[in-house]
Amino acid sequence: MPSACSEPNRRRRAVLALALAATAGLIPQAARGSAGSVWRLGVFPVVNFAGYTSHFGTRTGPWGRVEPHYGLDIAAPMGSPIRNWWGGVVQSVINDGTCGLGLVVRSGEYEHIYCHLSGAAQGGVYRSGPVQLRRGQALRMGELIGHVGVTGRSTGPHLHWGMRFRGAWIDPALVLREMARARRAVAHAPTAPPASRVALSR
């Protein structure tokens, strides 16, 4: 008998499958290989990973209320570098009481959200150490975009990493799983034998 949460899980998997198909459009054909291996190119956002402290979905929040949580909380020491998951453009700089200092980066049909950053934001510009980002600025995959902090609604240093695809929230843990699966597939893929001298001379 299906569990009560099987329908939402089915919807999430369908959105992820659609997102996987669309991801192929984010990079040049020459770099793609097979569509399934595109995920290997994504960058884990926290450099000094210390563990996961809160999952995506319904949870009991830090103040005791049951609430939806639209992201994955990744613990790291204060000031740890944060890297951009995928190449894109800064869509907005956030400075509020919930996300704290944060960024929204648009990559095609994806938005990836980074919250509780350290640093400062003023006049739509986010600054942290050598980082200075503003709306419309292009970012490379893996580029340094900030540092872990405790701004906003946060009880300790961590990155809240959220992700939307076509406006629908996606569990970032599923994306990380696909990234790991794609990297394993590439690592275990048979390699073509080197071309022989005869073939090269033709």
Image (cartoon, grey):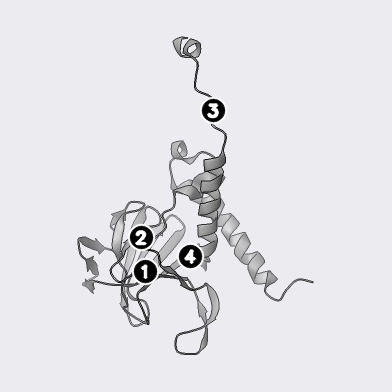
The image quarter in which residue 154 lies: bottom left
Q: Nearer the viewer, mark 3 or mark 4?
A: 3
Determine whether the residue tagged by mark 2 lies in a helix, strand or loop. loop
Secondary structure under tag 4 reads: strand
What is the crowding at mark 4: few (fewer than 14 residues within 10 Å), some, or many (at least 20)?
many
Q: Which residue is mark 2?
A: 47
Question: Which circle's residue, 2 or 1, is located before the other in the chain?
Answer: 2
Q: Amino acid at mark 2?
A: Val
Q: Which mark is residue 68?
A: none
Q: Which of the two discs, 3 and 4, labels the residue nearer the N terminus?
A: 4
Q: Amino acid at mark 3?
A: Ala
Crowding around mark 2 (Cα neighbors within 10 Å: few <14, some 14 to 19, many 20+) is: some
Asked whether 64 or 24 is in front, the reply is: 64
- Name the residue beneath numbered marker 4: 164
Query: What distance separates the C-alpha of mark 4 from that of mark 1?
Result: 23 Å
Q: Residue at x 40, y 64 (%)?
A: 49
CA separation in Å, label 3 and label 1: 40 Å
Amino acid type, label 1: Ala
Residue 66, quarter of picture: bottom right
Earlier in the chain: of badge 4 and badge 1, it is: 1
Sequence-earlier tag: 3 or 2: 2
Image location of residue 87, percent across then percent down = 37, 52
Residue sitting at x 30%, y 61%: 145
Find disc 3 in the rendering and name its residue.
192
Q: Which mark is residue 76?
A: 1
Q: Position of residue 2 (x, y in %)?
A: 75, 71
Q: Residue at horizontal 63%, vertical 66%? A: 11
What is the spatial separation of the Cα atoms under label 2 and label 1, in whole angstroms? 8 Å
Q: Quadrant of the N terminus?
A: bottom right
Furthest-right residue in this view: 1
Residue nearest the observer in this picture, 61 or 106: 61
Label 3 packing within 10 angstroms: few (<14), some (14-19), many (20+) = few
